[in-house]
Amino acid sequence: MSGKKHFIQDRAALLLVSANAFLALVAVVLVLLKVNATRGTANYIVSYRASLGIDGYTQGSVWDILNFVFAALLILSLGVLLGYRTYNIQRGLSLVVLSLTIPLLVLVIIVSNALLFLR
């Protein structure tokens, strides 16, 4: 039996990929449920500019909010792809890449829910 594992056979890598996939799924489902609750007819707050004072909230359409779904899927796919590609170079580097994808997905969840809560 070969002493070298593949990416798919490494339990730690698969655990991190599973955690990333779960967080991306949570981000997608939460955004789509909140958008579906309003049927996409409302204007959404998409940014806040502190320099504008009370009028600092910028409104946008449903497509601006759906960018959070695309961002979560892009972060997931790039994180897994980079983790897979770096596994042959060094296992530890691959696990670091997969681990650093988790805070990015958590940040997407927090920011998207904060903006959708302000709506």
Image (cartoon, rainbow, N blue to C red):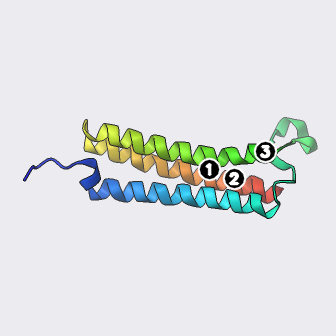
- Residue lying at the far left of the rendered structure: 1
Q: Is residue 89 above or below residue 102?
A: above
**Image x and y of residue 59, in percent:** 86, 44
Q: Residue at x 92, y 45 (%)?
A: 54
Mark 3 closeness class: few <14, some 14–19, many ≥20 residues within 10 Å: many
In the image, 42: left or right of 64? Answer: right
> In front here: 15 or 48?
15
Q: How many marks?
A: 3
Give the residue pinned by disc 2: 112
Q: Residue at x 28, y 52 (%)?
A: 8
In the image, 67: left or right of 6? Answer: right
Mark found first going from the N terminus, 1 or 3: 3
Q: Residue at x 26, y 44 (%)?
A: 91
Give the residue pinned by disc 3: 46
**Image x and y of residue 76, in percent:** 49, 47
Q: Is residue 72 above or below residue 35?
A: above
* Residue type, numbered disc 1: Val
